[in-house]
Image (cartoon, helix red, strand yellow):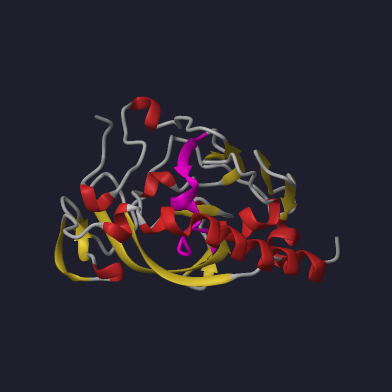
Amino acid sequence: MEGSDKLQRVVEARMKLKARFEEKMQQTPSVSDEKPMGMGVPNRHGMPVVPVGQVVTAKWPVLDLGLQPDIPLDQWELVLDGAVEHPVTLHWADFMALPQTEDVSDFHCVTTWSKLNMPWKGVRLLDLAALVQPKETATHLLCYGYDDYTTNVSLEESLKPDVLLVHTFDDKPLPREHGGPVRMITPQLYAWKGSKWIHRIEFLTSNKLGFWEQRGYSNTAYPWRNDRYSH
């Protein structure tokens, strides 16, 4: 498929997806909560500056499963499959040819630190979903990292405009220790919902637990509800 045709298909499918999930997005806690649990003056989305139980840090701590994969760009690939109409495997040039988005967002780690105003560049998950066109039965994603990490995200959360697969932080390539060359970010959820060293996104017709979810962490991971663990 020629690049211009691919981009046009993405743009058209993006609008259809947004319309399809708009109501569910509006019902998510980060949008609908009248009294979010947090501290400080209002920040993004009218929320307090940080969720309850969080402390602002200037540093960016490194957390992983004890493995930091080294993936050369000419070997990196992103598989998009599952309950989609057009499964695809993207290589680096394909990924960079998609619409690129710059965004500034906050990063809330379940281990109680928050780093604010982080400048990113990458591809919206919404645009990747538009490329492959999720089936009507699709409800969730399962994200896989090159380190064998997995995590689950509902489609209504993952299609929000600040959910990105980022390759750049602060105008520099995303460092390997933070998930480079590409990681997912989920600013309205705790950060473990964004897989580092991302390799595959599987669209699911029902929820499936990921690595930390299998170990007692929350399925939904809403920082503004102090939603750290399953109940």
Tell whether position 152 is magenta.
yes
Q: How many marks?
A: 0
Q: Is residue 69 visible?
A: yes
Task: Identify which residue, 175 or 53, lies in the foreground.
Answer: 53
Tell whether position 114 is magenta.
no
- Asked where in the image residue 213 lies, by quadrant, the reply is top left
Side of 150 where 97 appears, left or right:
right
- Asked where in the image residue 23 lies, by quadrant, the reply is bottom left
Residue 177: give x, y in percent of width and height. Answer: 47, 50
Side of 206 where 25 appears, left or right:
left
**Extreme residue toward the right, this view:** 1
Residue 86: give x, y in percent of width and height. Answer: 75, 47
Task: Identify which residue, 114 or 178, lies in the foreground.
Answer: 114
- Looking at the rendering, the stretch of residues picked out in magenta corresponds to 149-167
Seen at 74% across and 59% down, the residue is: 94
Quadrant containing the N terminus in the rendered view: bottom right
Seen at 54% across and 61% down, the residue is: 18
Q: Is residue 166 visible?
A: no
Residue 51: give x, y in percent of width and height. Answer: 21, 56
Question: Is 96 drawn above or below residue 79 in the view shown?
Answer: below
Side of 20 where 95 appears, left or right:
right
Task: Identify which residue, 181 or 142, lies in the foreground.
Answer: 142
Side of 132 where 43 appears, left or right:
left
- Asked where in the image residue 2 lies, by quadrant, the reply is bottom right
Residue 193: give x, y in percent of width and height. Answer: 42, 45
Question: Is 207 drawn above or below residue 36 in the view shown?
Answer: above
Quadrant containing the C terminus in the rendered view: top left
